[in-house]
Image: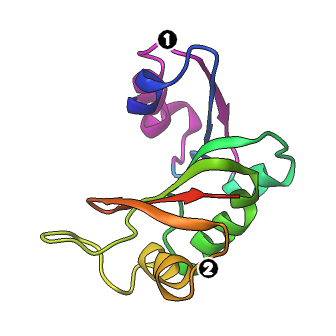
Amino acid sequence: MALREGMNAEATLSLVDPFHLSRAPMLNFTKLAAGRTVNNHSNGTVAWIEKFSHEAARNWKDPIDLLVVDGDHAEAAVERDWNDWSGFVVAGGIAIFHDARLFDGGWTSPHYGPVKLVNKLFRSAGTPGWSIKEEIHSMVVVQRHC
């Protein structure tokens, strides 16, 4: 909802989610709630891609200004999402990792996949062309420089 509120009128918000957790597709309340929330705003266009992230990435060709990594939280899955999608982020573009940092009163732990991957990619040796821009609550915002 916040992304839709703040996006440019000519922009496209591509949302990738398989909505696979419902036994009865017609009663998928997560999908219904997401649709109602996102469609409550009229900025830009929304493209719903009902696939797993790695499936959607296979045919992806468009540049990405903002990438949000918030899928399967296993370290290998987060790393796969990063490897599949980060190459599409434009210079100056942003990637946000959800549940990727420890914070006071938080629920994350050093064993969370996003925490481990962000530490490995951006805190230890660093990833060439990327740096941490900001850290907010459980999120880590990284920016591509080249």
Which disc number belongs to residue 141?
none
Disc 1, SS:
loop
Viewer-proximal residue, 139 or 52?
A: 139
Q: Which residue is mark 1?
A: 42
Near mark 1 (Cα within 10 A), the count class, few <14, some 14-19 or many ≥20, is few
Q: Describe residue 9's horizontal placement relative to residue 114 as left or right.
A: right
Mark 2: amino acid: Ala
Residue found at x 48% / y 33%: 27
Residue found at x 27% / y 75%: 102
Which badge, 1 or 2, is on the more N-terminal residue?
1
Q: Report if residue 20 is visible in the image.
A: no
Question: In which quadrant will I find the C terminus?
Answer: bottom right
Outermost left residue = 105
Residue found at x 64% / y 16%: 10
Q: Is residue 42 magenta?
A: yes
Give above or below for 85 relative to 78.
Answer: above
Could you say which quadrant of the image residue 77 lies in?
bottom right
Which disc number belongs to residue 76?
2
Question: In which quadrant will I find the N terminus?
Answer: top left
Mark 1: amino acid: Ser
The location of residue 87, given as percent across then percent down, is 76, 58
Find the distance from the CA under tag 1 to the CA under tag 2: 36 Å
Q: Is residue 125 magenta?
A: no
